[in-house]
Image: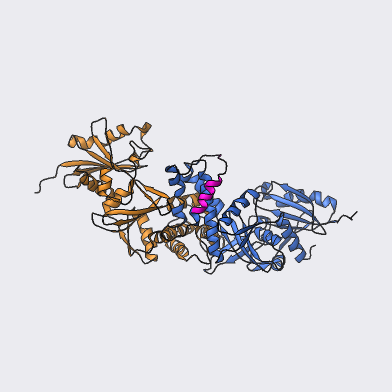
Chain colours: A orange, B blue
Amino acid sequence: MTEPHPPALIALDWGTTSLRAYLLDDAGSIAARAEKPLGILQVPDGDFDRAFAATVAPFLAQKPGLTAIGCGMIGSRQGWLEAPYAACPAGLDELSRAMASLTASDGTAFHIVPGMSVVDADGVPDVMRGEETQILGQFGPGESGVAVLPGTHSKWALVENGRIARFATFMTGEAFAAMRGHTILGRLMREGAAPDAAGFARGLDHAARPQPGRGGLLHRLFSARTLGLFDQIAGDALPSYLSGLMIGAEVEEAIQYLGAAPSTVTVIGAPALAELYATALARRSIVARPGAPDVAVRGLMRIARAAGLL
Amino acid sequence: MTEPHPPALIALDWGTTSLRAYLLDDAGSIAARAEKPLGILQVPDGDFDRAFAATVAPFLAQKPGLTAIGCGMIGSRQGWLEAPYAACPAGLDELSRAMASLTASDGTAFHIVPGMSVVDADGVPDVMRGEETQILGQFGPGESGVAVLPGTHSKWALVENGRIARFATFMTGEAFAAMRGHTILGRLMREGAAPDAAGFARGLDHAARPQPGRGGLLHRLFSARTLGLFDQIAGDALPSYLSGLMIGAEVEEAIQYLGAAPSTVTVIGAPALAELYATALARRSIVARPGAPDVAVRGLMRIARAAGLL
């Protein structure tokens, strides 16, 4: 029989639409977890202090006086306390030194991981908040690679020696929803249709064609109408076609961004979406490596260690 | 004193949201015109016959028995009588031979110009309906050039020797409205702000940057958020920035589509939008030639002549 490790840290992944809370033991393992509908846009009256207290109370009941660490939109201007962006390149050291700290009214010390910013060669900024912690939960000290975190705003990051060297946002998920829901492209689509693998593959094919003689996304999007008009793709399959076209376009753009197609990309995201990205990457002969589970809390633990909190 | 030319033809530019009617004399000049809110989506009960009769009655009162010719969505599946697409390349001869004809209940013969279709090297179709007539109103027999018809769905067409060789649709206008109205990009924008030339120019600059190391439109769109977040562009100027970014992206795509930047592009559209496109073209050292007025009716007249109606 092994001795149980005592509770050592509270970790909060606190985003726009949800709050995931974890109790970590002194070995860094998850001893307890909770998920609450208390994303920063949902907290009643913006009373983050109260939402925090209600969430961590069961953990503090197990061991009073624990410290808390958090990441995500809770550290944005719309959150509890702004944790200004740390500039790329940055890793555990930079993030742990740049945390914003407060004391909640229940007496708990709460440290908020900053988001990250990067400025491209043209002076145009990009930002992320929460994803930096997931990426550093996936890639340990000394590790390198490319990660994609698909979603509303997909993030692609280049990790070098345990530090995030640069990253870029692609508005794929949100642009897909806007094009499907608020343009003529939705007209021929059947709502509620099941995902269609052949339609998705056809979208990927169209996205992967080189530009010369063809044009880019603003033109190719219209194929989601014309292929329907000419009965080449059924209304059932059109949503998947558009999805393939846009995820495929993201992969092409990301390859351009990185300068060359990487051999492997780590896909950090929900299984269904990660599967679509794996298919899109395979279309370009890129191996999709599945992300580890609980990367946010793993990242929070590593940052807490770097900060001497654990 | 010159003898007035007698009325010779009724010409209708009948689109989705408006109906423009013209009485032409036997020299092809416009003798009278009317604009009605009777686009094909607005005609009560889809009674096109009645809308037609009400529109042409004043012209027929001047000279009974006139023939009518029309173009636009009235010839679509949702219109009065479908005029199947004529395939590219095509000019006055092909369009005049492929018209769909009916006799209205007032006894008037009405001939509807077909839309045009094109299939790219990958087998993907594109379509237009109404624009083909405008383009052939702009470019006379034997003339060649490149035209853009900016709008919800911008059309770029390559005209060779008086015939439309190929064309492509770019969803710029509709995508702009969807991104502005239905994504996070609208959040920092101030509604009702006046056009901002500097913001527009900055969007064009960002769109014109080459892809390697940068990524494409799905990534660049996000700059309309980050430049606002970092107070580099004011909320007043963000709509114009996004407009510049997207119109600039369209111009880059069109250059790719054409295979090289043309020296001159004829811009056929409403003055304010044509001006923006002229600015975007100038950014790439392309001369914008303003389109002629009344190109739709000029095109209808030429097609009518080719069909022996005039």
Q: Main secondary structure of the magenta part?
A: helix
A23 left or right, relative to B165 = left
Is A99 in front, or is A234? Answer: A99
Residue lying at the far left in this picture: please name it.
A1
Query: Residue at 58% across / 57% down in the picture?
Result: B281
Query: Residue at 38% across / 48% down in the picture?
Result: A127
Q: Quadrant of the C terminus of chain B?
A: bottom right
Q: How many marks are shown on the rendered structure?
A: 0
Q: Quadrant of residue B137?
A: bottom right
Query: Residue at 51% across / 62% down in the picture?
Result: A233
Please report the bounds of the magenta region as a residue range.
B191-205
Q: Position of residue B77 (x, y in %)?
A: 63, 58
Residue B42 seen in render: yes
Q: Does B87 appear above or below A21?
A: below
Is residue B202 highlighted in magenta? yes
Residue lying at the far right in this picture: please name it.
B1
A61 left or right, relative to A170 = left
Is A181 in front, or is A248? Answer: A248
Is residue A26 highlighted in magenta? no
Q: Position of residue B151 (x, y in %)?
A: 60, 52
Q: Position of residue A120 (x, y in %)?
A: 40, 53
